[in-house]
Image (cartoon, rainbow, N blue to C red):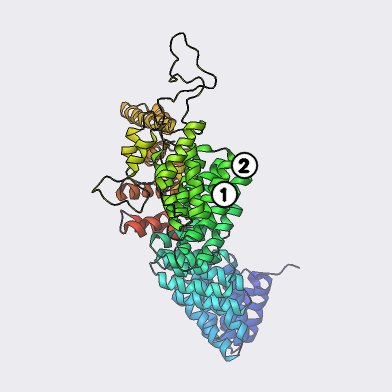
Amino acid sequence: MAFDRAAALRNAEKLLRQGNLDAAIEEYARVADDQPGDWATTNTLGDLYVRTGRVDEAVDRFVRIADSLGAQGFLPRANAIYKKVLKLKPDHEHALLQAAEFAASLGLLADARGHLRSILERRHRLSDVRGVAEIRVRLGALDPADFDARLAAASARVELDDVGGAVNELMEIADALVEKDRPDDALDALNRAALLAPGDEGVRQRLVGLHAGSGDLARAMEYASTPEQREALVRALLARGETTAAADYLTANVAGVAPDLVLAVAEIQLGGDWPEAGMALVRRVLDEHPQQREEIGRLACSFGERAGESGFTLVGWVVEAALADRDMSGAAAVLEAFTERAPNHIPALMRLVEISVDGGLETIMYRAQARLADAYIAAGMAAQARFLAEDLVTHDPADAAHLARFRKALELDGEEDPDAVIAERLSSQQASGDGDLRAPAADAHEIPPAEGAEPPPGHFELSTAAVDVEDILRQLDPPPGGHEASDSIEIDLSVLLDDIVGAPPVPPPIQGDNIDAVFAHLRDEVSRQSAQDQAQAEYARGLALREAGDIDGCVEALQAASRAPRFRFATASVLGRIFRDRGLTHLAVEWFERGAEAPAPTPDESHALLYDLADALEADGEVARALAVCLELQADAGAYRDVAERVSRLVELQGRG
């Protein structure tokens, strides 16, 4: 038989009016049990339990109502019922937890916080350590702006063995603190995370970004773990002039870093108090990046004057690498550039002569022999100097420098009458036809025989290039009352050369401060000059085409001109901006980077190009590289445009990773 709800309710009401509470409670209980969703009846039943002192039963009924209301989404009504329960039993945990949850969802944070703290105090009294930690986690989740509660919650997660959750919470706190412009507090949160998870790349990356953004590059170095991070920070240190810090750091963390940066640090060490460390870095770069051979050659030559032996060791490595590739010209070029800086370095000159002979590089060989003879003279090695100087005179008796060198060697060797020796040597060459004194058989300058006469067998005539021995010797002797002979072999050769008719041209000495000049000299000088002229014409044509609106033609012309180092910066700057304006960001980055590697005409132009490079890198999604460029620009140019704001933004973007 179906339950008659209406009849039961009428009967319960009668019983109430009669004052029979227990009987009325029984009727209401029957209705509530049969109809769990009848909240009004259940609420009335709970109130009757309270009136009769049956508090536990009342609380049980009220909790059922509140749970059901909450499950169905009636949060305000459920919250009201839970408050009713808490008036009866203030420490009822279920009611407190549910009330806190509902209050938080309604935005009543103060109420939610009060309920949770009541539970916290209760669990403290019960010495429930784990229970206390759970409530702290709940408290930390209430308000994202309550950083103290969130930090306490992160610590509580550790007590609950949720280290990963604690680290994630600390990183989120740090990100929020950065947005609030509280970098010191953000660093504190990240340091806590780093202690919990030393190997977490996300934590380390954020620490690198924050320390770099605040200018504390040394601290940032402590957390840098990727080659990209290390490279960006070392470049920033070098840009700020903190070379010792850069060298110290990179020596221990060279793996994966760009070889040009490693060489920059090696140069610092070679010129400072750590030459052995610098040599080790150079050796490593040469082994791992053989394409850096020319750069290492430049570095070695730059130390020719300051540290001859260290430089010669480096040159030796480069030479051996070149010879391994059968590049005899390259090996000779490096040695010749080195001897420009260390002109009296006998081992280097001997090696240069050896390689020139093996490679058939005759012009370089004679030039090296001349320098070696000068070095022997400077070192007081008379026998060696005399032999080489005489050999050079034999090769080219018309070269006044060779004659002066020979005389100097003879004097050093103790010869009493060097002029007589020179005269005898030149005379014997004329008689025997040695050297270049006799014209070739088919020489157009040969004096013809008299008309109708046959030249005698073996007859030859001196060419117009023949040397007047006595005239040369007179010029080698100083005039009466003139200045004393110089100790240097660098005598005035113009008088001698002017009087030597038809003397073959002397190869000009190599000029220049770096190995590029040597490499260029080894190639055809005329072709090189022609290429320069062509590059200049292409550059001018490109600018004219840009003014005329022919951008495609401009790009083609400027790319051709960019092959000449002299125009590299100017062409790369224009091309980078053209590609940027066309939306071809990756090409803009490529050209801006080429420009950054070339010397700029002025610091302002360099700063402008670096700014554009950073802008293009950020637009292309290269946040880490953009940050590195901005840091370099900030270190070099100070408060330049909006670079400070860019650094802060890029640090934040990198932190979000």
Along the line of sight, the residue nearer the viewer: 179 or 99? 179
Q: Is residue 100 visible?
A: no
Decide: few, some or many residues near mark 1? Use Cα within 10 Å; few <14, some 14-19, many ≥20: many
- Please give left or right for residue 420 compared with residue 14 in the image: left
The percent position of residue 206, horizontal first and vertical second, equals 49, 64
Furthest toward the top, the residue is 452
- How far apart are the alpha carbons under marks 2 and 1? 10 Å
Q: Is residue 512 visible?
A: yes
The percent position of residue 638, horizontal first and vertical second, equals 31, 59
Asked if residue 218 is positioned above or below residue 395 in the image, the reply reads below
Along the line of sight, the residue nearer the viewer: 318 or 51? 318
Decide: few, some or many residues near mark 2? Use Cα within 10 Å; few <14, some 14-19, many ≥20: few
- Disc 2, SS: loop
Along the line of sight, the residue nearer the viewer: 303 or 417? 417
- Disc 1, SS: helix
- Please give left or right for residue 61 compared with residue 381 in the image: right
Amino acid at pointer 1: Val
Report which residue position mark 1 lands on: 319
Furthest toward the right, the residue is 1
Report which residue position mark 2 lands on: 326
The percent position of residue 633, horizontal first and vertical second, equals 37, 55
The disc, 2 or 1, on the residue closer to the chain's N-terminal end is: 1
Q: Residue 19: which quarter of the image?
A: bottom right
Along the line of sight, the residue nearer the viewer: 190 or 630? 630
Quadrant where the N terminus sits is bottom right
Amino acid at pointer 2: Arg
